[in-house]
Amino acid sequence: MQLALFDLDNTLLAGDSDFEWGRFLISLGVLDEELHLARNAQFYEDYKQGTLDIHAFLEFQLKPLSTHPRAQLDAWHALYMEQIIRPMMTDKARALVERHRANGDLLVVITATNGFVTAPIAKEFGIKHLIATMPEEVNGQYTGRVSGVPSFKEGKITRLMQWLESRGETLQGFEASWFYSDSHNDLPLMKLVDHPVAVTPDPTLLAYAEEQGWPIISLR
């Protein structure tokens, strides 16, 4: 069996689910536009530049989850899926997932974005397994804090290895491993797999992929 790992934002999705979730809550009047939008944009720019303080970002991004009941969050997310996410799921992205599924590969979405936002998206792609940054829950209510290691940069490796160990597997135990990503933030994990693939890569990843002779594709 082969392992197929997919980054989500700007890889399988033609956009960023984390950034758009904030914008969506602003459009509903849940978040204050003036206060939230500027910080959201700055964090997103830091991410693209490779300077993101993941803990500061998560404190900011997870706070709205702690201030509303889960039923209300789920209702908003259903609307978010319909209005924002499904239009970002391209035919090429769906076809790539289906090619790996048809090959009998183990499919995993591995993303820095939190599991509340991303679990329904992975499910929409028909991908059962998700490794995401996990928001802490107590008695079914989000606390606004993160649980465990954020799935970001080297943290993706940590979380992947923990997940494989929980299944009694290792990365080396697969016939081959694939990882699709758009971001240089994912270079630590891309360097570990057999087949790293740059998907509409940012300039830093593009330069590295060209230097290494990695495949460069677009799912747009």
Image: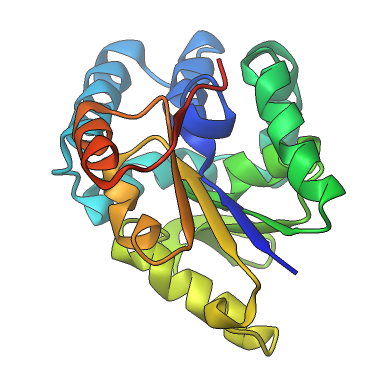
Q: Is residue 156 visible?
A: yes
Work out whether 208 lies above or below 192: above
47 vs 216, left or right, is left
Work out whether 52 lies above or below 199: below
The residue nearer to you, when weighing 151 against 200, is 200
Q: Position of residue 152 (x, y in %)?
A: 35, 56
The residue nearer to you, when weighing 213 against 207, is 213
Q: Residue furthest front?
A: 213
Q: Is residue 149 visible?
A: no
Q: What residue appears at the point 27 percent right and 31 percent down from the top-left corner?
A: 206
Q: Position of residue 185 (x, y in %)?
A: 28, 47
Q: What residue appears at the point 67 percent right and 67 percent down from the top-left corner?
A: 139
Give the colour scheme shown. Answer: rainbow
73 vs 44, left or right, is right
Number of labels in the image equals 0
Quadrant location, the N terminus: bottom right
Work out whether 80 lies above or below 48: above
Q: Position of residue 122 (x, y in %)?
A: 70, 43
Quadrant location, the C terminus: top right
Q: Position of residue 147 (x, y in %)?
A: 47, 68
The residue nearer to you, when weighing 23 against 137, is 23
Q: What residue appears at the point 39 percent right and 34 percent down from the top-left corner?
A: 182
Location of residue 71 by image quarter: top right
Q: Residue furthest bottom?
A: 168
